[in-house]
Amino acid sequence: MDIQVLYHTKTGHSRKIAQAVAQAVGVQARDIAQWQEETGCDVLFLVGGIYGGKSDQKMLDLVPRLHPDHVARVVLVTSCTSGTTQQADLRAALLTRGIAVDSEEFLCLGSFLIFRLGRPNQQDLAEAGRFALRKAQE
């Protein structure tokens, strides 16, 4: 099974989470800028943050570069200070493109200014890894 882990980050949180996910499934995490359009995979973990209640535009700009014949399934992993906001806009864009998206999304707490300092922590990263391993085996 071919598994890829891509991330986009502004704060470094998503990179840390992506590295934990990648380590759990035995691959290397890469920035979304490194995605090659001809690359294919069975499972693509997309790791990104929520900024102002939405996915970053750079993550949304990746979607047209993904081809449903090359990406069998996407699993979303999200960093969010509130711990409740999912990447609904990214999910919708992927589905509109014809790319299957796992119904379960992992939400990892991130920090912003004085809120949730120290997140994601080691426990958060370990949970992200366990989630990824479970999803990779499905």
Image (cartoon, grey):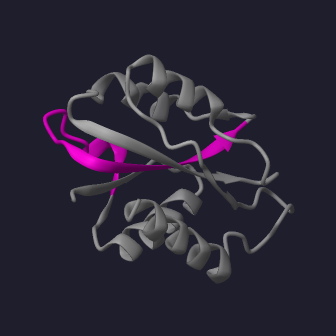
Q: Can you name the residue that lies furthest to the left here?
A: 38
Which range of residues does the magenta coloring cover?
A: 30-51
Q: Can you name the residue that lies furthest to the top here?
A: 96
Q: Can you name the residue that lies furthest to the bottom here?
A: 122
Q: Quadrant of residue 72?
A: top left
* Image side of residue 89 versus residue 119, left or right: left
Asked if 25 appears above or below 12 in the picture, the reply is below
Q: Position of residue 126 (x, y in %)?
A: 57, 79
Q: Quadrant of residue 69?
A: top left
Q: Position of residue 30 (x, y in %)?
A: 32, 56
Asked if 111 appears above or below 118 in the picture, the reply is above
Q: Quadrant of the C terminus?
A: bottom left
Identify which residue, 20 or 91, lies in the foreground.
91
Residue at image position (75%, 42%) is 85
Q: Position of residue 63 (x, y in %)?
A: 39, 27
Q: Is residue 32 magenta?
A: yes
Q: Is residue 33 magenta?
A: yes
Residue at image position (42%, 26%) is 61
